[in-house]
Amino acid sequence: MLSIPSRLADWPLAGLVLCALLLAGCASRVELPNDDHALRVRVQNSAIAPGNGGNLITAEALQAGDILLTSANSLPSISIQVGTFAPVSHAILYLGDGQVVEAVASGVRTRTLEQVIEEERMVVAFRVPGVESAHVERLRTWSLAQVGTRYNVIGVVLSAPFVLNRRLCELPLVPTPVRSFCVTGLARIQLGVSRNDRFFCSQFIIAAYNHAELPITRADPRWISPADLLHMRENDVPSIAATKPLRYIGHLKYKPPPTIADDAM
């Protein structure tokens, strides 16, 4: 979060920060002054670690319907993280009773929460506000009915240039309505031919909540990446608007990303 400097001497430093933000292409939101704060700019935040205001939790803290965002040390995962400028690469739906459902390269499948925690480097949980038992039942029924559905390969391929091109819409100080119009326009042009009867991971999550009649966003599921879900959390700046911000529950697992020194060992 960047506060507008009140002293002239502070402007050069603010200018350097602003230039860095422009190069990074981080979405931002201007918050007008009120009784609690002066005029300030809130910048999209990709930080996600227990040491950064987070906490480690156990599986008992989860509820059916929670969304798990994960990352691994594999090349595909790292490529997605680099391409989307985010520390997450995969999205999973928790169904309760230690079971999850997800869209992967082999198609929609179920596996156990224990397997997820064992196989991923980082697992962080978010909750959609307002989930009730009826929503959970619809989530579970629809999701399990999709098991075996093929992966949306075309959607993933088309997402690669879209992820890069949309950064122009997400430059700092671009007003939220302009950013939304820009991203939506690009998505309709670049992702319009993608199939909606097959799924990649985050598309599956959005579609599941749509069928549960508790939409996370009004945007087309084919437009949403794991990074978009991350930025739909509370106190962040989403590039694609959420109906309600997701609530951070905690980290089920966290291992710092490997460093160059680690790789050399």
Image (tube, rainbow, N blue to C red):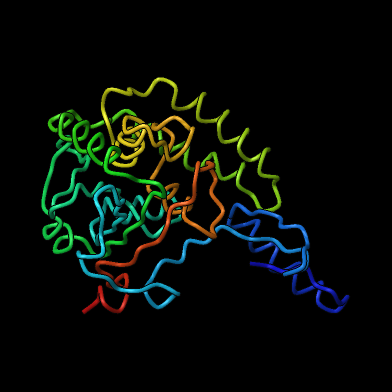
- What x and y, as percent, mark residue 44? 56, 57
- What x and y, as percent, mark residue 156? 33, 35
Position of residue 239 in the picture relative to residue 49 (left or right): right
- What x and y, as percent, mark residue 173? 71, 52
Position of residue 255 in the picture relative to residue 100 (left or right): right
The quarter of the displayed image where residue 137 is located: top left
Against 107, residue 239 (above or below) is below
Q: Nearer the viewer, residue 104 or 156?
A: 104
Q: How many labels sit on residues?
A: 0
Instruction: Report the residue that reaches farthest toward the top.
Output: 193
Instruction: Report the residue that reaches farthest toward the front.
Output: 133
Q: Quadrant of the N terminus?
A: bottom right
The quarter of the displayed image where residue 37 is located: bottom right
Position of residue 170 in the picture relative to residue 200 (left or right): right
Q: Nearer the viewer, residue 10 or 41?
A: 41
Q: Nearer the viewer, residue 207 or 3?
A: 207
Q: Quadrant of the C terminus?
A: bottom left
Q: Which residue does the image show at 27% across and 64% down from the upper left?
A: 122
Q: Which residue does the image show at 45% across and 74% down from the upper left?
A: 53
Q: Which residue does the image show at 60% across and 52% down from the upper left?
A: 27
- What x and y, as percent, mark residue 46? 47, 61
